[in-house]
Structure formats: C-alpha cells, structure tokens
Image (tube, rainbow, N blue to C red):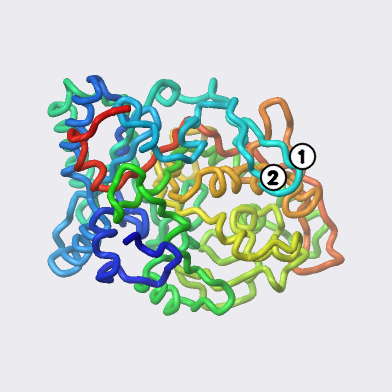
Amino acid sequence: MSANLNQTNIEIDDPNFRAVFQNLQGNILKGHGRDHSRHIFFAFKGDSDQNQQVLNKLAEKVTSAEAQHQQQSSYKQTGQAHLFVNLMLSCSGYQQLGIAPKDWPDDPAFRAGMKDLQTPFDTLPRGGHTPTANPLNDDISQWESGFQGRIDGMLLLALGGMAPDHAERTLTAEVQALQQTYDDNLELLFVQRGHVMRNDKGQVIEHFGFVDGVSNPKFLFSDLNEEFRNGGYSRNDPSAPLNLVLVKDPGGNPDSYGSYVVYRKLQQNIKGFWDRLALLANHLSENSSSPIDAEYAGALCVGRFKDGTPVSEQGNDGWSNLFNNFSYDDDADGLRCPFHAHTRKTNPRGDTVRQFNSPPTIERSRRIVRRGISYGETELSPEQEWTDAGLLFMCMQASIVDQFIFMQHTWCNNAGFVRPGTGIDPLVGQAPADAAPPPQQWRSGWSNPNASTTDFSFAGFVKTQGGEYFFMPSLDFLQSLGCRQGA
C-alpha cells in the first residue's frame, strides 16, 4: 500500500514509513548537513544496457533517507564522518537508459529540460491565462559552455565533520576515483565545487553576507520540535506534508518515491550589490528624519537583516538561527517589509490570501525545499565586480511547474505581484532580455504610512550561469536497472 503523502510531523524511524525511507534518497526531507560538496555532471557513453549497468553500480554509493539518519546518529556518538551521495537524472538520462516513456517522471518542465525555451507552461492556472514560454526569462547564450550541452545526470558528493583541507582532499580523490572507474562508461562533463560559508556566529550565509536557509519547510517531528524550541510557530506554521516534495517514482515499486530537482548556478555581483545599496541608502536618507545606511537598505531588499532578523520584526528581541515565527498579518500594506523584498516575494506568508482571497493551502503549496551551497571565492568585500562567487542553487519539489517556475515567474519576475507597481524581486527577479526592469518603491520610514517613497530600480546582481531540471529517483529504481526492457 502506498504511503499517505498528506502526512507531516512524522519521524524518520516511523515503522509505517520504513520501506519508503529505505527507498528514498537522503537530502530531500532533511539537508545532508555537510560543509563541502562536489556536483559532478555526467553524460552516458554506452548503449542503454551498458548505461543501466553503470548506473546500477553507482547506486551502491547513494545514501538513503534512512542511512542519512543513521550516519548523523553515528557522527553524534563517535565523531566519524561519512560520505554522502545523491544521484539524479535529467530527461535525457532516462532516454539514454532506454527507459520506456511511460516510466519517465511526467512533470512537463522536466521532460522539456531547462534549455527548452519554446515549451509554454501554465504558470497562472486560473482564468483565461495564456501559457508562457521561457517563464524564467533565461538567455541560454550567456550560460557557461558546460551547461549548454547534453547533461544526463548529476552526482552530489558531500562531506563534513573534519578539517576543511581534509574534506576537500577526500572529495577530490573521490572524483578522481570515479573518473578512473567509469572512464569507459561515463563522460564527466564538469564538476562544481561547493562550500558552506559562515559568519562569526557560525550561521550559514551567502555571498551578500545574509544568513541563508532560515525558513525551509519542515517534514519531520524532530525538525518541528527544534523550530518550536527556537521561537515557536504560533504565527507561522513551518510544517509541510510529504506531498510538497515527494511524488511516486513511476519506475519503482509501491513504496518508491522521488523528487524533482531544480539546479541553477547563480553568480553574485557582490561589489555591485553593495555599491547600489549605498546609492539607495543615500536616496532614502534625503527624505528621512534619520540617516539610512546600506545595511538597512539591504534589509529592505532581502526582507531580513544580515543576522536573519525579519525587517518586519526589527523592533522585536530574541532572534535565533531558526527565527521563522512571524507573518505579515500586521504589515498588510507593506509599511515594514516591502512587497518586493526577496523573502516576501518567495514566501508571501498570507499576502495572496489578503490580496486575492486565495486559499492559504494554495500559497503554501508553492513552497520549495532549498538545498543550495555557495561556490567560489570567500571574499565578501571584493574590489572587482562579478568575481567567481555565488550560489549553486538546488531545490526539491513535487512539481517544477507549480512550485519553482510559478514562484520565479509569477511572483519574483512579476512587477505586479503582490500589487501593481511592486516591482520584481531585487535579488533573483529577472526581466526579459529586451526589457529594463521597472523601479520598485522604497519607503524612507519604517511602519510609517506617511513616509515618503522613492522610485529606485534594483536588479541585475545575480546572473544565471546555467542549470538543468532533474529527478531524484528511488533506490529501488536505481537498483533494478540492468533487469529492465526499454520502450
């Protein structure tokens, strides 16, 4: 019998889900927690039978959700580090394996691939909406060459719990061993090297210096309990049902589930971002009773201060690393946190209910599960713009179209969301290549309805360098390869 994916607040050792979690890859319901990673993009070299055999062999290395839990428990008790492995396939990967199309994951974006800019997607499913092609406003010609060719799959290797140099050397050796072992079967196209960055409080940050990953959905009882201890959830429910991120694996058995993965390499212009914030701060200060600095302007842009404090709650005390217990119920007009702020665009926390009378369950169903990691230089105050630094963005969801694409197109890239004249998301919003982004409105006084506003365009400091859509299949599917017949 299939598992009930409407459930949440379960535990990884729940006997009713044991078969599911033995078959499910790790890093979906809970992040792998390692500070160093390698993302290895590959293409198959052989015929379908040979490709199935090599993937079957690679499946022996993949970490299940159950094994991930056991590794974390072992590390807490013994301090022994464990290599973590994910394996994901693109639609072309399924084709190269000779899998019958009926056993392919059926999300239309997955089947089209991220480089397909012609397929229209229904990103506004109600009313007389015309489906939109290239909803992300991508310009493939600007991508790195490695992302422009055929990518059949990606292996994620992650390691932590040891000295950084040791972890990096070990991961490099693992990549070299894979190259030597599978040289006749796989072409390792390119490798992305990821590393976690932290501030002086030990909090995970991204290259603009802001705490990252604060408000991910929570599926497991232990994670919800931790959230409760670190601020509660009286004003925001962080829980999520399994069907937010899991779907049936069409090639597996009744206990087999997987998740769709969006991968985007995002380069960040750190110097340009802070120079523009300084200019915005000067504009706001001209109409403010007190000076406004770039850090406060950055909080208006992101929706949180660098330490994670929500700008809508800036007068409150007691912030913690999991501070997520807030909503915009007391800020319905965007007087504290601007409607265009990144965290409000990507997680409106009731705005769509207030503005469009949309059921709260619909808004919550748009959430994604972020599992990204930084790459490149660690200098947060570079002298040059567009250094080799940014985010290897990765998120999981049950539907690429209804979650990631909807969020990016209908919320972040939409200057009219949540109200006309809001402007695009100043961090990740992307206007069409032939259009300049309209300015956002910035308020010079916090929570003051009479404060003056300034029209100021803030965009273009995050650049997509490439990406792909993947499916993270069940271990049962991977382990059964070599015993299958094609279409």
* Position of the N terminus by quadrant: bottom left
Q: Which residue is mark 2?
A: 424
Can see residue 180?
yes
Q: Is residue 173 left or right of residue 441?
A: left
**Closer to the camera in the image, 130 or 388:** 130
* Mark 1 secondary-structure assignment: loop
Q: Is residue 244 left or right of residue 195?
A: right
* Mark 2 secondary-structure assignment: loop
**Mark 2 touches mark 1? (CB < 8 Å):** yes
Name the residue located 18 percent from the left edge and 27 percent from the top edge.
179
Across and down, in percent, residue 96 comes to: 31, 25
**Closer to the camera in the image, 120 or 341:** 120
Disc with the residue nearer the chain's start (2 vs 1): 2
- Distance, label 2 to label 1, CA atoms, is 8 Å
> Looking at the image, is 452 positioned above or below residue 373?
below
Residue 81 sits in quarter: bottom left
Name the residue located 14 percent from the left edge and 26 percent from the top edge.
180
For residue 438, which numbered disc appears in the image?
1
Across and down, in percent, residue 155 comes to: 28, 38
Mark 2 packing: few (<14 Cα in 10 Å), some, or many (20+)? many
Name the residue located 66 percent from the left edge and 42 percent from the top edge.
413
